[in-house]
């Protein structure tokens, strides 16, 4: 299991890029924190989610 935004998910073994694509995230408008470290957007495809990883997906939101 992988904890993503506080929710347990069966995402171990897939790349972060594939997870984002499968869940309709736009990589250009988010920041990913993996196990306490901010990831470089260019590396999403090379990161494979592992058991017990903790992922936070932070989205940019406009407002006024």
Image (tube, rainbow, N blue to C red):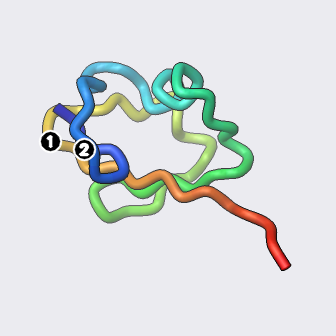
- Nearer the observer, disc 1 or disc 2? 2
* Near-viewer residue (15 or 60): 60
The answer to whether mark 1 and mark 2 are in CB contact below 8 A is yes
User: Residue drawn at (22%, 33%), measured in percent from left and top?
Assistant: 50
Q: Is residue 4 above or below residue 1?
A: below
Q: Position of residue 7 (x, y in %)?
A: 27, 44
Q: Residue furthest bottom?
A: 64
* Near-viewer residue (17 or 22): 22
Locate the C terminus by quadrant: bottom right
Residue 52 - label: 1
User: Residue drawn at (62%, 42%), measured in percent from left and top?
Assistant: 42
Q: Is residue 62 above or below residue 48?
A: below
According to the image, label 2 marks what residue?
3
Q: Position of residue 2 (x, y in %)?
A: 23, 37
Query: Where, by quadrant of the figure, is residue 53 drawn?
Result: top left
**In this image, 2 relative to 64: left or right?**
left
């Amino acid at each position: 299991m992988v904890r993503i935004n506080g929710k347990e998910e069966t995402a171990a073994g897939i790349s972060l890029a594939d997870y984002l694509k499968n869940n309709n995230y736009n990589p250009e408008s988010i920041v990913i924190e993996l196990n306490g470290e901010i990831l470089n957007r260019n590396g999403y495809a090379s990161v494979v989610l592992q058991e017990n990883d903790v992922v936070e997906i932070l989205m940019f939101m406009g407002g006024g």
